[in-house]
Image (spheres, helix red, strand yellow):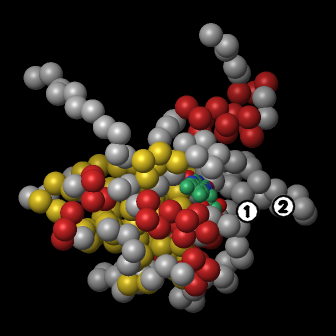
């Protein structure tokens, strides 16, 4: 085994170890709005479920590496959810992976990624940010808590949101079970590589 000490390598190399090890990662496609109502849409693969009762999901916007002026900055999504305390988490399927990827470009806050990607905004029921119509599963969320883990470049914040509404395409749903063959969710590996959810096997949990 090779033993590596984070302090002896760059944060970029540590990032590579983390994203190559924690695979595949599901993708939270998060729509948010700033206080003026400008829409934002961005994918986050540092994403999981924290609780089912109440239903809490979480994702992690990282601190952007320094720009040419040497300034690190937070992502628009983090600024928006802190300011407005709401967001929608959309699940990503393979059929709109390219449009999801288009939303990961480092665009200025005034740019609306719905327009950039051509994805369709769909009004939410209880929060202001719209859902992504192309997505088969939407979760309308109210901010529960933000943990600012590190403000260093490539540091990050943990955003926890309570799901107020699930919207699930009827054809995927059978007695609260979601059909993975219809969902076609994708996951992120390192770099530009993605994984499908079609190669599966069964393992029954011991009693
Ligand atoms: C599939 C995918 C997953 C990503 N996951 C993350 C993530 O977990 N955390 C993060 O900070 N950036 C992640 N990014 C990069 C952000 O999407 C990108 O920085 C985006 O521009 C942020 O948008 P915003 O500034 O509008 O919030 C990911 C990009 C892609 C394509």
Q: Quadrant of residue 7?
A: top right
Q: Are marks 2 and 1 in contact (CB under 8 Å)?
A: yes
Give the residue displayed 71% in from the left and 21% down from the top: 5
Counting other residues with Cα less than 10 Å from the Cα at mark 1, is it few (<14), some (14-19), or many (20 or more)? some
Residue 25 % position (x, y) = 47, 45
Give the residue displayed 68% in from the left and 55% down from the top: 63
| Extreme-right residue of the structure | 69
Give the residue displayed 38% in from the left and 70% down from the top: 135
Q: Is residue 26 visible?
A: no
The picture quadrant for ligand 1 comes to bottom right
Between the C-alphas of marks 2 and 1, the distance is 8 Å
Q: Is mark 1 within 8 Å of ligand 1?
A: no
Residue 73's tag is 1
Give the residue displayed 22% in from the left and 31% down from the top: 202
Residue 126 % position (x, y) = 31, 81
Q: Quadrant of the C terminus?
A: top left
């Amino acid at each position: 085994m090779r033993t590596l000490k984070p302090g002896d390598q760059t944060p970029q190399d540590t990032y590579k170890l983390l994203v190559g090890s924690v695979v595949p990662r599901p993708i939270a496609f998060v729509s948010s709005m700033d206080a003026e109502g400008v829409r934002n849409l961005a994918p986050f693969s540092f994403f999981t479920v924290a609780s089912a009762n109440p239903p809490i999901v979480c994702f992690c916007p990282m601190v952007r590496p320094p720009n040419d002026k040497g300034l690190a900055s937070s992502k628009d999504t983090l600024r928006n959810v802190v300011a407005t305390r709401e967001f929608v988490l959309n699940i990503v399927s393979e059929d709109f992976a390219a449009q999801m990827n288009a939303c990961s470009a480092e665009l200025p806050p005034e740019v609306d990624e719905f327009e950039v990607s051509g994805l369709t905004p769909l009004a939410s029921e209880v929060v202001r940010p719209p859902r992504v119509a192309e997505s088969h599963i939407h979760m309308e969320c109210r901010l529960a808590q933000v943990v600012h883990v590190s403000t260093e470049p490539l540091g990050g914040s943990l955003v926890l949101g309570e799901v107020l509404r699930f919207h699930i395409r009827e054809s995927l749903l059978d007695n609260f079970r979601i059909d993975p063959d219809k969902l076609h969710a994708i996951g992120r590996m390192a770099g530009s590589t993605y994984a499908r959810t079609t190669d599966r096997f069964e393992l029954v949990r011991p009693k």
